[in-house]
Amino acid sequence: METTITKAYGTESADAPIKNMDIKRRVLLDNDVEIDILYCGICHSDLHAVHNDWGATTFPIVPGHEIVGKVTKVGDKVSKFKVGDLAAIGCIVDSCGHCSQCNHGEEQFCEEGWTLVFNAPDKHIGGVTYGGFSQQIVCDADYVLKMPEFDDLAAAAPLLCAGITTYSPLKHWKVGPGKKVGIVGIGGLGHMAIKIAKAMGAEVTVFTTSPSKVEDAKRLGADHAVLSKDEEQMKSQSGFHMVLDTVSAKHDVNAYLNVLGVDGSLVLVGLPNQPLEVGAFNVVNGRKSFSGSNIGGISETQEMLEFCKEHNITADIELIKTDQINTAFNRLEKGDVRYRFVIDIKS
């Protein structure tokens, strides 16, 4: 297949810095769109992938899956987009399109395996896919989102991962008025979860290990904030319908199972790279559930974007230039960001 060259930012090994590199993109197929990337968020999973923390990285790698840009070309069969439209790409750029999950709009659970925007086998030109730390991207139009005209497009980029990762379980577990919801952790995912859960009408309590974030939780819209290291504060918590756990490091999930009410669910969306221990009595007592949630399908991601536009929800970001990516990765590893780095690709 014919290809073109575009500039990107990636690395050739787990211990090497991000640097400029040239990558191949396919020439447009009939149902493809080409997008000039304006902004791309940096997610904690980008950091894990670059460091090969999960042991599945193929190098070289170009990360990035919170992509916002403008359409520059459209294939002959594309009617969904025209040149100049705002567009967005999240984690999914392909799936089988015909299994029961794809037919129900849940491509993230594709039975044949969906294609991640980066570091997945590239079905078209071979090798692996390359993500949004790049100047351009080509994608099947069926997996490209229509991007609403947010006042701050850069701050909307993290919605493509952090937004849908939290929106999807909150919707699935029917969060809304009269529901008592806990959010564990205030980071890239957690701060989005607070905003979305409040917009859905829930009573929101944040659990944080950081005293400095207690007040920030309320600024973000939480009704209550609990210092999870304080045993007395934790003992006073109970009756939660759902607790959304956004933490991507090893931690004690039993503390949060214990605050659930009968039939309550603890839902994990963080991705710790070590196993988590669960005490049997902590789920048996009260018929509680410990569950997980991935991102969302394409239609649900589009729904989330419209919901966030309607409720004026974007991420709290620090906008950086491309020559600051390595510094941002180092700071992210230390938790030194409130609450999402976004790369100004066109800078």
Image: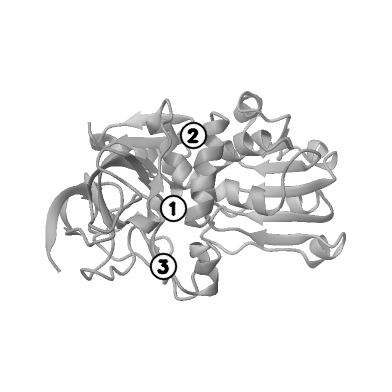
Return the x and y of residue 177 as percentages of the image width and height.
77, 38
Q: What residue type is labelled 1?
A: Ser
Q: Is mark 1 on a helix, strand or loop?
A: helix
Mark number for residue 216? none
Mark 3, residue position: 95
Relative to residue 183, is residue 212 depicted above or below?
A: above
Distance of label 3 from label 1 (alpha carbons): 20 Å
Q: Which amino acid does label 3 sit on?
A: Ser
Q: Earlier in the sequence, mark 1 or mark 2?
A: 1
- Please report the residue visible at 27 percent of the width from the left and 66 percent of the height from the top: 128
How many neighbours does mark 2 have within 10 angstroms: few (below 14), some (14-19), or many (20 or more)?
Answer: many
Mark 2, residue position: 339
Q: Earlier in the sequence, mark 3 or mark 1?
A: 1
Q: Is residue 187 visible?
A: no
Q: In which quarter of the image is residue 291?
A: bottom right
Q: Which amino acid does label 2 sit on?
A: Tyr
Relative to residue 139, is residue 181 depicted above or below?
A: above
Mark 1, residue position: 45
Q: What element carries label 3?
A: loop
Return the x and y of residue 273 as percentages of the image width and height.
51, 60
Q: Nearer the viewer, residue 157 or 82?
A: 82
